[in-house]
Image: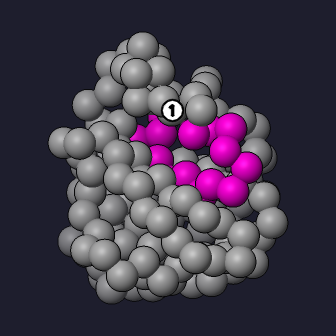
Amino acid sequence: MKNSFITLSGKETEKIGFNLAKKIAAQRHSIILALNGELGSGKTIFTKGFLKGLGVKEKIVSPTFIIFRHYNVNLSYFKNIYHFDFYRIKSYRELKILGFDKILKEPKALIIIEWAQKIKKYLPKETIWINFQYGREINTRKITFDKK
């Protein structure tokens, strides 16, 4: 199943994330969102909207230099949200050191991964893939959701 959206600004990209969060908040199973796209294509802006949609009050910034951030939430099902940025990851060994394999198995976790294409072979088939592409105009983006 593929769905695509064209956004004309960062605000619209953030709103797509916010709206998806409202739908996902009612789920009763762990969720993995795998975000792919070039640098500056909207992954972090989307994630900000998504986390706001789940009620995260903390300042939301990309975890590029620290690899991941953890947010405690008090939703009906999800208890932990993990936001990963694998731009700098070079090996599976680095993921193991982070405890990534254990996090993937958490039953009430919501996991968001920027640069997920780098670890595609380690992700379960239920992963929701979200691809970000530059549009023809300077601030436009094409966002494609792909749940296999």
Along the viewing direction, whichever of 141 and 78 lies nearer the viewer: 78
- Name the residue rendered at 52%, 72% in the picture: 73
Relative horizontal placement of residue 119, taking residue 85 as reference (left or right):
right
Q: Secondary structure at mark 1?
A: helix
Relative horizontal placement of residue 145, taking residue 50 as reference (left or right):
right
- Name the residue rendered at 47%, 21% in the picture: 96
Which span of residues is magenta-colored?
A: 103-117
Where residue 3 appears, x then y in whole percent?
67, 67
Q: Is residue 121 visible?
A: yes
Colour scheme of the picture = one colour
Number of residues whose C-alpha sits closer than 10 Å to that of mark 1, classed few (under 14), some (14–19) or many (20 or more): some
- Name the residue rendered at 57%, 84% in the picture: 19
As drawn, 78 above or below 36: below
Residue 104 falls inside the magenta stretch: yes
Where residue 110 appears, x then y in whole percent?
60, 57
Residue 67 falls in image quadrant: top left
Along the viewing direction, whichever of 70 and 86 lies nearer the viewer: 70
Q: Amino acid at mark 1?
A: Phe
As drawn, 49 above or below 65: below
Where residue 75 appears, x then y in whole percent?
63, 77
- Name the residue rendered at 35%, 53% in the picture: 69
Q: Quadrant of the N terminus?
A: bottom right
Residue 12 falls in image quadrant: bottom left
Where residue 108 appears, x then y in whole percent?
69, 56
Residue 76 falls inside the magenta stretch: no
- Disc 1 target residue: 100
